[in-house]
Image (cartoon, grey):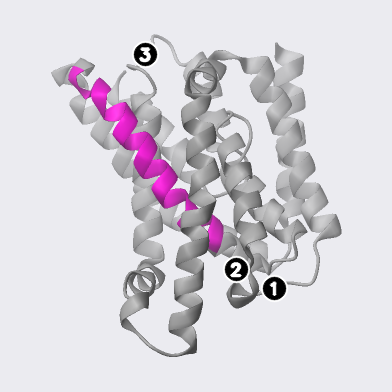
Amino acid sequence: MTTFQALFLGLIQGLTEFLPVSSSGHLAIAQHFLPNFNQPGLLFDVLAHFGTMLAVIIYFRRELIRLALAYFRTGEQARTDRRILILLLLASVPTALIGLSFKDFFEQSFDNLPLIAGMLLVTGTLLFLSERFRKPGRTEGAMTFGDALVVGVVQGLAIIPGISRSGSTIAALLLKGVDGETAARFSFLLALPAVAGATLLQLRHLGQVQAAETTAYLTGTVTSFVVGLAAIHMLMLVVKQKRLGYFAIYCWLAGALLLVFL
C-alpha cells in the first residue's frame, strides 16, 4: 500500500464514517479498484476507523467527561448521564456478541461486491423509512432499555459492508421515536467501544506491516481523524434539518450503479 492510497482511503473513511452511506462499503469498493492494494486482515480499515473514533472523542469530549464522572455527581443531569451510560453498556452487548460470532463471515464479505451493492440499497431504504415514518422525538432522559437493545443489534449487523453503521443506528432510533440529535449523539458514542474492540482484535496484524508502509498506515489514520471531525459536524446539521432522504437517494444510486457495473 502506498502513502497516496492511504491518504485517499483515509479521506473516504473520514467522510463516510459519519455521513450515513457506509464507510466500510466505500472502503471495500475503493480497495477493490486500487492497483496492488493489500493489507493484513482488515488492519488498515480498522486503523482508519480508529482515526474517526478519535474524532468522536474530541467532538463529544464534554459528553464523555460528564459520563465518566456521572457517578460522582448529583442532580438531574447526573441521573440522566448515569442512565445513558448504562444504556450504552447494554447496547454494546449484542454488538459484541454478533461481531465475535460472525467475525469470519463479516471479514470475507469485504470482497463480495454484489453483497455490498445490495446492502447499500438496504441502507438507502432504512434512511428513507426513518425520514418518512420518524416519530415525535424523545430525549436522552426518555430512552429505554428496548431502545438500547434494538440499536445494539442494528450496530452489530452493520458490520456487514454496505450497511451504514451511523445511518442504520440513527434510523433505528428515529423509528423508535428518539429525537434526531439525541439519536445521532447516542450512535456516535455507541461506536466507541465497538471500534475499540475491533482495533484490539486487528492489532495482531501489526507485525505483518512492512517498515516502508508504516508511514502510509499513519497517514491514513490521521487523515480519517481530521476529515471525520468535519463530517460529524455536517451530519449533526443534516439530522437536525431532517435531510437524511438525500443520503437515501445517494445509497440507492451507488448500489444500483455498482450492480450495473458488476
Is residue 183 covered in magenta? no
Residue drawn at x 33%, y 72% as measured from the top left: 65
Q: Amino acid at mark 3?
A: Asn
- Residue 208 in percent (x, y) is at 22, 15
What is the quadrant of residue 154 in the picture?
A: top right
The image's mark for residue 138 is 1
The image's mark for residue 38 is 3
What is the C-alpha distance between the residues marked 1 and 3? Answer: 45 Å
- Element under disc 2: helix
The image's mark for residue 78 is none
What is the quadrant of residue 195 in the picture?
A: top left
Q: Amino acid at mark 2?
A: Thr
What is the quadrant of residue 183 in the picture?
A: bottom right
- Residue 122 in percent (x, y) is at 75, 34
The image's mark for residue 182 is 2
Mark found first going from the N terminus, 2 or 1: 1
Position of residue 8 relative to residue 144, above or below, is: above
The residue range painted magenta reads 186-207
Q: Residue furthest right?
A: 132
